Image (cartoon, helix red, strand yellow):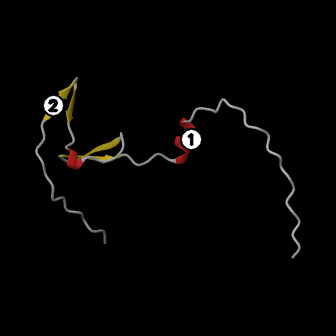
Amino acid sequence: MPRRTTINHERHVKVFKNGRDQAVRIPREFAFPGEEAIMRKEGNRLIIEPAPPKSLLAVLAMLQPLSEDFPAVVDLPPDLVDF
């Protein structure tokens, strides 16, 4: 049975307008790593969580192609081994 985590920290924050959106600053003690987050609403609660890291394929898809040429690799046969 999963154990529920109790949150012992609470802080009142000011909600302000940013253009047509509402915004809130996340206090330092609640900060999480990364630059993206997932926000969802459960009843009257707003939940903000750090976005999970992107998959390796997603990261590789964002990379720019290399413009340099690599030298040819000499593919020598393996040394013989006597068992």
Q: For residue 60, which numbered disc appears in the image?
A: 1
> Is 58 in front, or is 70?
70
CA separation in Å, label 1 and label 2: 38 Å
Badge 1: few (under 14), some or many (20 or more) residues near its Cα, within 10 Å?
Answer: few
Q: Position of residue 51 (x, y in %)?
A: 37, 46
x 79%, y 44%: residue: 73
Left or right relative to 68: residue 77: right
Where does residue 4 sit, x and y in percent of width and height?
A: 24, 65
Q: Which amino acid, mark 2?
A: Phe
**Front one among 28 and 1:** 28
Vertical placement of residue 27 versus 3, above or below: above
- Image quadrant containing the N terminus: bottom left
Can you give x and y, in whole percent of width and height, for residue 21 in the image? 23, 28
- Which residue is drawn at the image coordinates 18% and 58% (left, top)? 7
Q: Nearer the viewer, residue 17 or 32?
A: 32
Q: Is residue 82 left or right of residue 20?
A: right
Amino acid under disc 1: Leu
Residue beneath the point at 17% across and 46% down: 44
In the displayed structure image, the side of residue 44 where residue 77 appears, left or right: right
Look at the numbered disc 2 and give the secondary structure of its residue.
strand
- Disc 2 crowd rating (10 Å Cα; few below 14, some 14-19, many 20+) is few
User: In the rendering, which numbered label is found on residue 30?
Assistant: none
Residue 16's label in the rendered image is 2
Residue 26: x and y in percent read: 21, 42
